[in-house]
Amino acid sequence: MTQAKKLTYYEILGVQRDVAQEEIKSAYLQAAQRLHPDKNTAEGETELFLDAQLAFETLFNPVRRAQYDATLPPEEKHSDIVSHKIHFSRPNLVRIDEPQIMYVLLELEAIKGKDAFVAPPMNLCLVIDRSTSMQGPKMDLVKSSISQILRLLRPQDVFSVVSFSDKADVVIPASRVTEPGRMEARLRLIQPSGGTEIFQGLNMGYTEIQHNYSSAYVNHIVVLTDGNTYGDEQNCLQLAKKAGEQNIGITCMGLGSDWNDILLDEIACATGSSSVHIAQPDDIQKILIRKFESLSNVFADDIMLEYKPTDQSKITYAFRLQPNSGPLIINTPMHFGSITQDETLNVLFEIEVQPSKDNSDSAILLDGNLKVTIAARPTPVPPIRLRITSKFEIDSAPEPPPDLILNALSRLRLYRMQERTRVDINDGRYEAATARLQTLATHLFSQGESSLASTVLMEVQNILKSQNISDEGSKDLKYKTRSLLLSAPQEKRK
């Protein structure tokens, strides 16, 4: 049997060796909270807690830190947890006196170890809209879907259900599933009535998650609604930001067409998750079960990019291509979301690079660290250094992007067309909106997406008649062009 590798003090605290002195205390407090014996009783974790204390005492003292550093072997450059690859849209930048765009594709993948992968337990809360519009088949299908999830939960999982209209109630308190029949009986008591106030349900769902919150769990909220909420949008976004800071994911599912997709997108993006469109009630069970299966197979429950903005380059757009496609909020930290053991996480960046002021040979496109959170791992994962640069050349022969990026850009272009169409309509540029949609339809027809192309042309007529897109057409355009990114052909890996 091979002996387990001894962790360095830096690895125990989850930091790199060149970490600033003032950041060591913050890293220790996070590690200590995770490993404290009051919260973690697993075998060996008390020793890790004591090791974290010793690591802090050594590294927080500059003299002792220098003495300790002198005893260490060279730092390994690559993570043994998550691998990453970087692809560029072109080999280099051109030395010109105006800004230029470079596309960068980041691929992240779990490194499969020798030991069998064991998914961490879930702390899952379903927050279900029970407003009047949910009565009938919609609510019946939601209840039957939850009943099926109850039978798929593992003994270690914690589960809760909240229903909401203009007020919220706990239907199934956060607990492990020991009596699914009794829980199903509580589901049958849900009676649709009232209006839709998402914050009421989201806040109560967050409270249920807190009862069993642990960094050793995959903590996640799934919100399902078929209606618009009014007046509580900022409260929802503030709560989502708070959840994201605690690594609590929020997936938002909109049923039908009468809901605010922009709000649900923003709530989900704040936590690294995504919003989902459920076009027909018959799809409720399939989509809920698919989400549950994805959560039960999580390897890393969040990957977060912390980067330093520079004067020379700026991220102007960021989009997660897979596993759950959707735009990302451009700030630091930037939440990429979770990856499973068998999936690759792909993020495409659009980066604007300013002309070189000092005739330097290269430009820093992105300088930061990837922070990986793995609930099943007792110690923090050391950050992955991500420093992306590109050289300037005086002249550059035109060269097509690699297939991987070319395929992504061609399909992302379709999604961004519908984004810009919304902006055109909001700004009163109706002629520009119809022209853009006609171009989108042409591209869709050429790619064999005739059904979606026909929907686009119908929306052209709606703009001409009413100077707006229908609610149903708006959702179809947004989520169906987004889903095309998941079916984009991937460059075959060698």
Image (cartoon, helix red, strand yellow):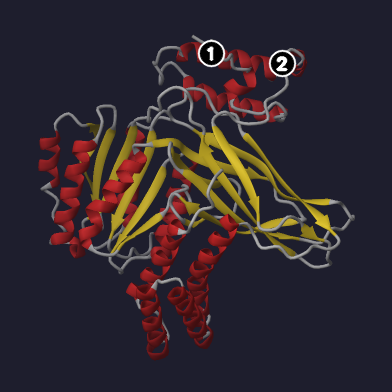
Q: Amino acid at mark 2?
A: Leu
Disc 1 on helix, strand or loop?
loop
The foreground one among 273 and 391 is: 391
Q: Amino acid at mark 1?
A: Ala
The foreground one among 293 and 58 is: 293
Q: Residue 116 in the image: state x and y as whole percent.
A: 40, 24
Residue 193: in sight, yes or no?
no
For marks 2 and 1 on the same chain, the one whose residue lies earlier in the sequence: 1
Disc 2 on helix, strand or loop?
loop
Residue 216: in sight, yes or no?
yes
Residue behind mark 1: 4
Above or below: residue 180 compared with residue 442: above
Residue behind mark 2: 72
Q: Nearer the viewer, mark 2 or mark 1?
A: 1
The foreground one among 229 and 177 is: 177
Above or below: residue 159 compared with residue 402: above
Label 2 Cα crowd, 10 Å radius (few <14 / some 14-19 / many 20+): few
